[in-house]
Image (cartoon, rainbow, N blue to C red):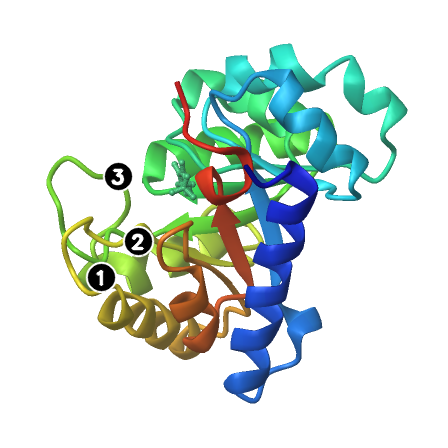
Amino acid sequence: MTSPNQALSAVRHKIARAARAAGRNPDDVTLTAVCKQQPWDHIAPVLDAGQRIFGENRVQEAQARWTERRANIPDLQLRLIGPLQSNKAREAVALFDAIETLDRESLAVALARDIAAQGRSPELLIQVNTGEEPQKSGVIPAQADAFIARCREVHGLTISGLMCIPPANEEPAMHFALLGKIARRNGLAQLSMGMSGDYEAAVRHGATSVRVGSALFGDRD
Ligand SMILES: *Cc1c(COP(=O)(O)O)cnc(C)c1O
């Protein structure tokens, strides 16, 4: 079995190789280690190996895991990659360095309020439902430009980029390309896309952040 250390090196190596093959600087792609539903003994070795950016999909689970530990890890960066209920916005703004799942007006309102109240501004990404799947969160592509504009102009939010989760059974490349196109025409620099199965393809299509879970930590419970 590969150790967490070896898994981390392998993923970083593949990211760098995919970046170079696409004529990109490997330093322009960050790795978010998605540790949701992983026991701490799977996470600790990856942290010890130097990984500092972690992705979580639930506010409560992330609070339980990181609130006390983060005091001892000054350069830790926590990113919320799962759906956020408006009534959890306050806790999310307090804990996370990035929230990647802004996808509706009511959440924009709540985040603007809590950012102002706390004087803390996590990076914000808008989730786009590129496959227009009914069960999936995210704004549909046709409404993305208008939603981005409203977040900026009506709610005064600084939007850093876009995030997507392509449909499980489709070729992800066209979804990555679509996300990149929407980002470019809206002047957005950050593209969060690519998971364990497709992060190299995502890097080739311009991902600035890939979200890798099982390839680093093993299968979740
Ligand atoms: C769980 C999750 C990931 C990581 O998935 P793996 O296939 O385990 O790499 C990435 N992004 C989101 C939004 C997730 O929920």
Determine if the C-beta at disc 3 is less than 8 A from ligand 1: no
Residue annotated with mark 2: 128
Amino acid type indicated by mark 2 = Val
What percent of the width, then of the height, locates residue 11? 57, 56
Amino acid type indicated by mark 1 = Pro
Q: Residue furthest bottom?
A: 23
Q: Mark 1 touching mark 2, by CB under 8 A?
A: yes
| SS state under label 3 | loop
Q: Is residue 212 left or right of residue 205?
A: right
Residue at 26% over, 49% down: 139
- The image quadrant of residue 35 is top right
Residue annotated with mark 1: 141
**Label whose residue precedes the other's in the sequence (2 or 3):** 2
Q: Is residue 151 left or right of residue 139?
A: right
Q: Where, quadrant-wise, is the N terminus in this rendering? A: top right
- Residue 137 is marked as 3
**Label whose residue precedes the other's in the sequence (1 or 2):** 2
What percent of the width, then of the height, locates residue 95? 66, 25
